[in-house]
Image (cartoon, rainbow, N blue to C red):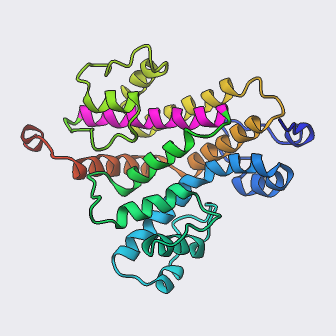
Amino acid sequence: MAKYYYLIAGLPDISFSEEKPSYTLSQFRDEVYDAVSEKDRKLLDMVFLTVDHENLVSLLDAFIKGKTPDELTEMPLKSDQGLFSTSQLVALIQAAAESEKCPSELPMYMYDFVQLVLDENNQTSQFREDVLSSMFYDYAAGIRNAFVRNWMLFNRDLANIQTAMTARKYGLDASALIVGNDAVAQALKTSGARDWGLTGTIDFLDELVRINEEKDLTQREKMIDIMRWNWLDENSFFNYFTIEKLFAMLEKIRIAERWYKLDKEAGQKLFRMLISDLKQQVEVPQEFENN
């Protein structure tokens, strides 16, 4: 395992409470990416793949609505922090649409996702974003690095439980909203128990239940990100000068930058959109509609 003594020792400390991040994603990429091995760089890349998901879904939606590849290439990306350019993602969509070979630089699960969406015989009640997330987490489950793999699966379980809690609160059916088919996901889809039978299986369940009682939606989201931050600290504590420490720092930078950009008003809007999306995806019980 590679050791990055001087690299890590020279990086600044990051605090969740900083009003303005002292170190940015762009700085990290400029200073760290060229200094790590290709194998370790691919682990860091996992952080940015979810950004590519947003860009890919946006381009695919436009393709389905009739935009040509040339027109797609002229579209601005949702975010410029992903790994792949517009032209690379458009090439992926073209290849999948024409059943040609997946471009070598892009993950196969993205190619499979595009083919799945374009196949009229494979309709699903899930959002496209959720389908892609499910395929991504299946991909992440095969990562050999235990720290990165466990981080990805922790976030999957965290997001699934949050979705189940929100759906239950508003009387909605969460089964079409849960990502993945592992034991935790199946319990959230099918169990009527108050804890979905997950007490003792999910060690952060009680903490998440307490956080869910917070009425201020922005504060609740911040508490969840603090939980993520603490997970990174606790699970990378003994990884002094390894890629795990760099990966944890990268995720912390992303969290810090997010909160610098997200004010309270934007946070409230975020959660109103969440509830709206949930309502659109499931059949709302009559008694809920009348309230």
Q: Position of residue 264 (x, y in %)?
A: 46, 46
Q: Tell me, yes or no, if residue 219 can be seen here.
A: no
Q: Position of residue 6 (x, y in %)?
A: 92, 40
Residue in the picture at 60% in, 43% down? 255
Q: Position of residue 19 (x, y in %)?
A: 65, 43
Main secondary structure of the magenta stretch: helix
- Specify whether 65 is left or right of 242: left
In which image quadrant can residue 65 be found? bottom left
Extreme residue in the front direction = 100
Q: As displayed, is residue 168 above or below residue 218?
A: above
Residue in the picture at 56% in, 42% down? 140
Residue in the picture at 54% in, 57% down? 108
In which image quadrant can residue 216 be found? top left
Q: As displayed, is residue 96 above or below residue 49?
A: below
- Specify whether 42 is left or right of 222: right
As for residue 176 lying within the magenta part, the answer is no
Q: As displayed, is residue 147 above or below residue 71?
A: above
As for residue 163 lying within the magenta part, the answer is yes
The magenta stretch spans which residues?
A: 146-169
